[in-house]
């Protein structure tokens, strides 16, 4: 039959208000480990950081969805779900060498944490035998050195963490170089060749098509310079009619 070595911890006094608790002599610690890191030879290169003390209090936030109010004239606005938020976990932890009683330096642990935070590695947070149901990344990390040894190396450090959910299906953003394109706008429409002009009616028809072509050019130019809202309506009434009058008058877009 397996046994567990425990230490009985009673409350300090009747007025302390703290319940009696039973703790194991060697409890499992919190581990923050990277996921999917490989070295140049394809071997496992994941980094595992084990917190020797705590953390006891973890703050979980942003589990609710983000909402948006849709205005309605003369009525209360509608409340609609915009999207889900990235969940966050915040905690404080003390980093020290437990085996030596806080004598040995902990610079190697700080270096591992800084490597994870600086490179944005995806991690898995496990508390004893219970882990978060999602991957996280370190989005905020700060520490304060409380004790150092005679060589100036930190032996006890107080740290603050904020972990943010990293979705599994997260397509990496690729920065592409912009491709410059000179717009091809005809300032002087070419006259149709002699073989296309069969009679005066064909020439009249060709000239009648020029205002419509100029109107489409002016309309595209105006749409590129106007910021539309979600309704897609022009911010200024009558702008389309004004553009058509400009096209009839022979205005060429610049």
Image (cartoon, grey):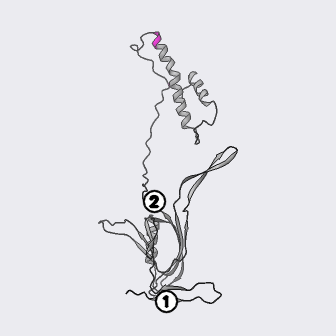
Residue at which label 2 appears: 167
Quadrant in which the C terminus is drawn = top right
Q: Residue reaching furthest right?
A: 74
Which of these two is toward me, 43 or 144? 43
Using the numbered discs, state the Cα–Cα distance from disc 1 to disc 2 in whole angstroms: 40 Å
47 horizontally vs 161: left or right? left
Magenta stretch, overall SS:
loop
What residue sits 44% from the left and 38% below the top? 181
Mark 1 Cα within 10 Å, few/some/many (few <14, many 20+)? few
Query: Is 171 drawn above or below residue 150 in the view shown?
Result: above
Q: Residue reaching furthest top?
A: 199
Residue 147 in view: yes
Which of these two is toward me, 38 or 230? 230
What residue sits 56% from the left and 60% below the top? 64
What residue sits 50% from the left and 21% below the top? 210
Q: What secondary structure is marked by label 2?
A: loop
95 horizontally vs 246: left or right? left
* Rendering coords of residue 253 (x, y %): 54, 29
Q: For residue 121, which quarter of the picture?
A: bottom left
* Rendering coords of residue 35 (x, y %): 39, 66
* Rendering coords of residue 41 (x, y %): 29, 66
**Residue stretch in magenta:** 178-202
Check if residue 212 falls in the magenta segment: no
Foreground disc of the pair 1, 2: 1
* Rendering coords of residue 170 (x, y %): 43, 56
Q: Earlier in the sequence, mark 1 or mark 2?
A: 1
Residue at which label 1 appears: 7
């Amino acid at each position: 039959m397996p046994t567990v070595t425990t230490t009985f911890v009673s409350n300090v006094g009747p007025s302390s208000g703290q319940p009696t608790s039973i703790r194991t002599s060697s409890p499992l610690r919190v581990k923050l480990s990277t996921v999917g890191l490989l070295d140049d030879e394809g071997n496992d290169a994941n980094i595992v950081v084990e917190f020797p003390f705590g953390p006891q209090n973890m703050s979980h936030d942003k589990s609710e969805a983000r909402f948006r109010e849709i205005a309605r004239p003369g009525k209360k606005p509608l409340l609609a779900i915009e999207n889900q938020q990235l969940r966050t976990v915040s905690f404080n932890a003390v980093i020290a060498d437990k085996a030596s009683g806080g004598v040995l330096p902990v610079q190697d642990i700080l270096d591992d944490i800084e490597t994870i935070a600086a490179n944005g590695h995806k991690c898995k947070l496990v508390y004893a035998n219970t882990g978060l149901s999602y991957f996280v990344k370190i989005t905020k990390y700060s520490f304060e050195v409380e004790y150092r040894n005679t060589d100036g190396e930190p032996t006890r450090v107080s740290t603050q963490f904020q972990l943010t959910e990293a979705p599994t299906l997260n397509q990496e953003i690729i920065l592409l170089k912009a491709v410059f394109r000179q717009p091809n706008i005809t300032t002087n429409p070419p006259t149709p060749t002699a073989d296309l002009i069969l009679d005066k009616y064909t020439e009249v028809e060709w000239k009648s098509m020029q205002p419509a072509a100029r109107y489409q050019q002016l309309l595209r130019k105006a749409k590129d310079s106007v910021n539309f809202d979600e309704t897609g309506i022009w911010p200024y009434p009558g702008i389309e009619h004004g553009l058509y009058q400009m096209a009839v008058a022979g205005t060429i877009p610049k």
